[in-house]
Image (cartoon, grey):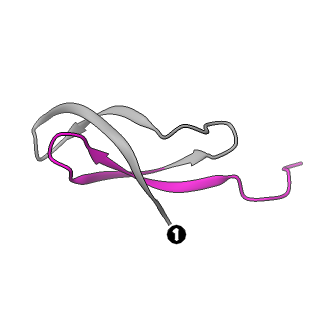
Amino acid sequence: MAKKGDHRITVGLTCAVCKNRNYVTQRNKINTEAKLLLSKFCATCRKKTEHRETEKLK
């Protein structure tokens, strides 16, 4: 049975080079306390760059 409470939050990922928000994902705020830093493809830069968590979405 699942635990009570909503521990997953929706966050946007922003390219570190061009500052465009390209991805939306979810993370567990209890298990992952630090902000996300993922290597993803940026369509604007046309290459693989670091994407950082920027804001919580509803």
Quickly name the residue at label 1. 58
50 vs 25, left or right, is left
Query: Hey, which quadrant is residue 55 in on the image?
Result: bottom left
14 vs 10, left or right, is left
Q: Name the residue: 46% across, 38% down.
A: 36
Q: Is residue 12 magenta?
A: yes
Q: Given the current orientation, which residue lies at the most extreme right position?
A: 1
The picture places residue 9, in percent across and down from the top left corner, at 58, 55
Q: Is residue 26 magenta?
A: no
Q: Given the current orientation, which residue lies at the most extreme bottom position?
A: 58
Q: Is residue 10 above or below residue 15?
A: below
Q: Secondary structure at mark 1?
A: loop
The magenta-colored residue range is 1-25
Q: Name the residue: 11% across, 47% down.
A: 44
The picture places residue 13, in percent across and down from the top left corner, at 36, 48
- Label 1 CA crowd tier, 10 Å (few <14, some 14–19, many 20+): few
57 vs 18, left or right, is right
Q: Name the residue: 72% across, 58% down.
A: 6
Q: Say what amino acid the circle numbered 1 marks.
A: Lys
Q: Name the residue: 40% across, 34% down.
A: 37
The picture places residue 5, in percent across and down from the top left corner, at 79, 59
56 vs 51, left or right, is right
